[in-house]
């Protein structure tokens, strides 16, 4: 058995139970590169290979064109130096033979040469060799939705994003949310694709904004078509006009349709649309620009959306210690001998719910080892869907599960958690260590870690509900990615190598509603976390029950 397979092996005595919690060893799904930044980084090597194939193709084509130019010059020189001379030159049998031979043979060889076809075939073959490792169209769609998610949650200006800047409007002024060290502007075709993804989901709030930028950039380029582009100005105007119509801006839809007809005057569908728009408007003249306020589409977490987004935008807004004397920092041992010589740096960030941040919980080397161990087993993260598990747009990440026997570092982490919390982590009282890597705009919308339904697959373990969560930050991020506690109204930024701990259940076994939390979208960076979920059973003497609902 390979090392990777051994690390991710499963205890077959409980495989039927754990398979309900997560499909650990499922085959990689197509179109899920965007759900993990690590996978996106790996795509760089794929494009580097494509560049090598393209360079070879260009070199071969350059040699072929050099031969074409040489042939052109040879024949051109004959016409300017020999055939334009005295008529007697053609009486020379050598001159006549060369002309006849060239017209019968050389021109045919040049015109019907297979060299261009062979060069193109070699280039296509190189592309096809890399094709299985390349993003699918679902990845492009997912990445586009990731950009729109970042736009919404962090209130980013689309025109700034297009120019490579992360900016918002605050107090009537444009301010930087984050200034990346490296960024690039988007092309008109890039914006067209993002707008088209929104358009195809009937999300006209986003399609209008992105297609407006696409139209601006296409117009600015003089409508120049590039072979790598999917969209054109005409395509953009077509989608943009209908998007404005669907948002109620008929006047601007008419104006855009009339602009489109200048490029495609015989387009019957657009002509019919113009006639329809004119009838709807009557004698009202078209507007020069859109003025109707766009409405964001509804979401499953609409009730908490404003709080969630505000907490994400603050990028860490936990209560200050001077505001609540019950909050404090100290060196914590929990009475464990293993922590006496090196106590844990504890920061109590909230009392309701009780949330603690343990600084320097693991070392950088340990975090790197855990990321490397999880890499081969990363699969699209799933969520509870009734009695089953399913992928969902409100959780964009990939995850893998590591047993404590996978590597000594995993065993050390489990032992450290036990020393710190006093909880029993022996199977099946705790789940395996779940390692998560977030994708483009990767996030996890507001949710509870504990089961809120009796049909939850968590109960298939027969060890009760999830009583506690310990989440380890295995990496830093440049911006975004905070953990937001919605009802408690605070967020905790990503602190590399730290661990966040909270109780999901009250001592009476009821779920703690204040633990509703979310993983804010990662604005810039590669976010890795590891989750350890501990169940009720096995903790009877570690965390005693109480009928008091406040405990």
Image (cartoon, rainbow, N blue to C red):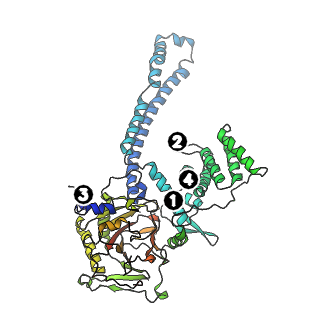
Residue 285 location in percent, x, y?
Answer: 77, 51
Upstream in sequence: badge 1 or badge 3: 3
Looking at the image, is mark 3 or mark 2 nearer the viewer? 3
In the image, which disc is placed on residue 200? none
Residue furthest toward the right? 283
- Does any portion of residue 372 appear in the rendered image? no
Q: Which residue is mark 2?
A: 227
Q: What secondary structure predominates along the stretch shown in magenta? A: loop
Q: Earlier in the sequence, mark 4 or mark 3?
A: 3
**Pointer 1 residue:** 147
Seen from the viewer's position, the closer of residues 229 and 54 is 229
- The residue mark sitting in front, 1 or 2, is 1
Q: Earlier in the sequence, mark 3 or mark 2?
A: 3
Disc assigned to residue 191: 4
> Badge 1: few (under 14), some or many (20 or more) residues near its Cα, within 10 Å?
some
Crowd rating for badge 2 (residues with CA inside 10 Å; few <14, some 14–19, many 20+): few
Tell whether label 4 touches label 2 (CB within 8 Å): no
Q: Secondary structure at mark 4?
A: helix
From the viewer's perspective, is 160 left or right of 401?
right
Which residue: 55% across, 64% down? 152
Residue at image coords 46%, 13%:
97
First of labels 1, 4 by sequence position: 1
**Boundaries of the magenta span:** 292-301
In the foreground, 254 or 163: 254
Residue at which label 3 appears: 5
Q: Is 295 in the magenta?
A: yes
- Disc with the residue nearer the chain's start (1 vs 2): 1
In the rendered structure, the answer to whether residue 509 lies left or right of residue 233 reads left
Going by the image, does 172 lie left or right of 507? right
């Amino acid at each position: 058995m390979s090392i990777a397979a051994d690390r991710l092996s499963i205890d077959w005595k409980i495989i039927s139970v754990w398979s309900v919690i997560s499909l650990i060893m499922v085959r990689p799904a197509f179109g899920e590169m965007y759900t993990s930044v690590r996978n996106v980084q790996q795509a760089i090597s794929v494009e580097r290979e494509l560049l090598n194939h393209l360079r070879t193709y260009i070199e071969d084509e350059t040699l072929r064109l050099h031969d074409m130019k040489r042939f052109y010059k040879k024949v051109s020189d004959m016409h300017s130096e020999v055939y334009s001379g005295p008529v007697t030159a053609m009486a020379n049998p050598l001159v006549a033979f060369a002309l006849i031979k060239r017209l019968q043979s050389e021109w045919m060889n040049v015109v019907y040469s297979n060299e261009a076809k062979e060069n193109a075939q070699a280039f296509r073959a190189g592309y096809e060799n890399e094709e299985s490792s390349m993003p699918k169209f679902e990845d492009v769609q997912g990445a586009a939705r990731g950009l729109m998610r970042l736009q919404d949650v962090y209130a980013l200006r689309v025109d700034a994003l297009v120019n490579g800047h992360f900016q918002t409007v605050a107090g009537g002024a444009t301010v930087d949310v984050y200034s990346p060290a490296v960024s690039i502007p988007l092309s008109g075709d890039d914006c067209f694709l993002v707008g088209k993804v929104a358009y195809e989901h009937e999300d006209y709030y986003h399609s209008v904004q992105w297609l407006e930028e696409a139209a601006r950039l296409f117009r600015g380029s003089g409508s120049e078509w590039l072979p790598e582009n999917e969209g054109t100005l005409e395509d953009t105007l077509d989608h943009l006009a209908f998007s404005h119509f669907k948002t109620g801006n008929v006047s601007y839809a008419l104006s855009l349709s009339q602009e489109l007809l200048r490029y495609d005057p015989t387009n019957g569908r657009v002509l019919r649309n113009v006639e329809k728009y004119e009838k709807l408007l009557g004698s009202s003249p078209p507007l020069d620009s859109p003025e109707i306020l766009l409405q964001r589409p509804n979401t499953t977490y609409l009730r908490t959306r404003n709080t969630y987004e505000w907490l994400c935008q603050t990028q860490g807004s936990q209560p200050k210690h001077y505001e609540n004397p019950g909050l404090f920092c100290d060196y914590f041992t929990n009475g464990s001998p293993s922590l006496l010589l090196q106590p844990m740096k504890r920061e109590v960030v909230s009392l309701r719910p009780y949330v603690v941040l343990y600084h320097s919980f693991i070392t950088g080397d340990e975090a790197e080892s855990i990321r490397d161990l999880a890499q081969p087993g990363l699969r699209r993260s799933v969520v509870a869907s009734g009695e089953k598990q399913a992928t969902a747009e409100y959780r964009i990440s990939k995850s893998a599960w590591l047993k404590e026997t996978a590597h000594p570092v995993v065993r050390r982490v489990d032992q450290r958690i036990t020393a710190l919390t006093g909880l029993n982590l022996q199977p099946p009282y705790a789940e395996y260590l779940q390692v998560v890597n977030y994708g483009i705009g990767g996030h996890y919308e507001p949710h509870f870690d504990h089961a809120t339904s009796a049909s939850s697959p968590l109960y298939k373990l027969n060890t009760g509900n999830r009583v506690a969560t310990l989440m380890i930050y295995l990496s830093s991020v440049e911006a975004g990615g905070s953990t937001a506690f919605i009802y408690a109204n605070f967020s905790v930024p990503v602190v590399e190598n730290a661990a966040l701990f909270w109780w999901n259940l009250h001592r009476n076994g009821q779920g703690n509603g204040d633990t509703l939390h979310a993983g804010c979208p990662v604005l810039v960076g590669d976010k890795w976390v590891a989750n350890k979920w501990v169940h009720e059973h096995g903790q009877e003497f570690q965390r005693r029950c109480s009928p008091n609902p406040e405990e």
